[in-house]
């Protein structure tokens, strides 16, 4: 299938240009808010609004900072102002996650609640946002998949080689957005000890991201990393799985005491 070249601007209103990628971020925000509000029990609607605002701020700032450090440290060293040229693109999920964790830490302190109480509440809602943003990657014809000869392969207009490639963005939208969402909502149906739901998020996302990265082309300026086999995304996701397993162990161990 040849993917048509999609105008990145979805709607032009005078000087205001609304881009498809911005719309998918808006959909991500609305989706996360809707799922979180459905699960709203221990926090108020006002607190949820604060969590969404500061969480989004943390995701954007952390995502940009993380991308520069994880994927472009050489360029950042040569040109520190590149960090602030956000219009040139570049966001990292793992950096965004760190930004959200920082935002949640300060919110939990100001609310006088436990850090993991907030994380366990919001974690099941996050996947729907991840899936929406991956669809934005597909529409933007970015983060291309690896070459394939499968009938469902896609030729992206941004690919100068014109190769048939895996639509890896859609693989990740399905796995990170739908599969992980269903799994976490199922996990959260019954009461779990503190840290457990957050642990399952780390394990689930890290596992799915590591698996789907095998269908995604590594960043051209980085290539493969560890063992000439793993992408940078996999190298950042595997520690998530290990951290999740460790937190899960302590979560259930604390219950037994």
Image (cartoon, grey):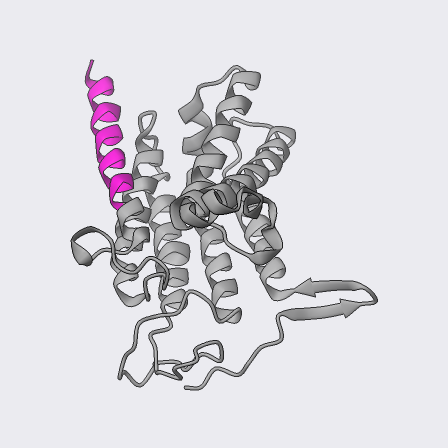
Kindly identify the residue that appears in the image at 54 percent across and 37 percent down. Answer: 58
Say which of 183 and 98 sits in front: 98
| Residue 125 appearing in the image | no
Q: Is residue 256 magenta?
A: yes
| Quadrant position of residue 22 | bottom right
Write down the region rendered in magenta.
238-257
| Quadrant position of residue 164 | bottom left
Q: Is residue 115 above or below residue 135?
A: above
Kindly identify the residue that appears in the image at 57 percent across and 33 percent down. Answer: 51
Q: Where in the figure is residue 95, as x and y percent of width and height?
A: 44, 42
Kindly identify the residue that appears in the image at 41 percent across and 45 percent down. Answer: 73
Instruction: Check the picture and name the quadrant holding the N terminus.
Output: bottom left
Kindly identify the residue that appears in the image at 24 percent across and 19 percent down. Answer: 255
Q: Where in the figure is residue 53, as x and y percent of width and height?
A: 62, 37
Q: Is residue 239 magenta?
A: yes
| Residue 76 appearing in the image | yes
Q: Where in the figure is residue 106, as x and y percent of width and height?
A: 53, 22
Q: Is residue 44 above or below residue 14?
A: above
Q: Is residue 203 left or right of residue 66?
A: left
């Amino acid at each position: 299938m040849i993917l048509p070249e999609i105008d990145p601007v979805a709607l032009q209103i005078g000087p205001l240009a609304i881009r498809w990628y911005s719309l998918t971020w808006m959909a991500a925000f609305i989706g996360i808010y809707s799922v979180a509000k459905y699960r709203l029990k221990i926090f108020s609607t006002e607190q949820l609004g604060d969590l969404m605002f500061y969480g989004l701020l943390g995701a954007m700032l952390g995502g940009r900072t993380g991308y520069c450090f994880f994927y472009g440290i050489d360029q950042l060293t040569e040109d520190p102002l590149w960090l602030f040229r956000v219009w040139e693109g570049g966001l990292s999920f793992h950096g965004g996650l760190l930004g959200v964790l920082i935002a949640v830490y300060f919110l939990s302190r100001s609310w006088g609640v436990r850090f993991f109480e907030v994380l366990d509440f919001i974690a099941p809602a996050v996947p729907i946002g991840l899936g929406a943003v991956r669809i934005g990657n597909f529409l933007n014809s970015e983060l291309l998949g690896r070459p394939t000869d499968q009938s469902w392969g896609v030729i992206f207009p941004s690919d100068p080689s014109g190769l048939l490639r895996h639509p890896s963005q859609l693989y990740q939208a399905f796995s990170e957005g739908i599969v992980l969402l269903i799994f976490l909502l199922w996990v959260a149906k019954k009461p779990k000890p503190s840290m457990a739901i957050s642990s399952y998020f780390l394990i689930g996302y890290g596992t799915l991201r590591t698996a789907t990265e095998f269908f995604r082309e590594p960043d051209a300026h980085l290539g493969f990393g560890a063992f000439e086999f793993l992408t940078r995304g996999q190298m950042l996701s595997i520690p998530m799985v290990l951290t999740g397993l460790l937190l899960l162990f302590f979560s259930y161990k604390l219950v037994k005491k």
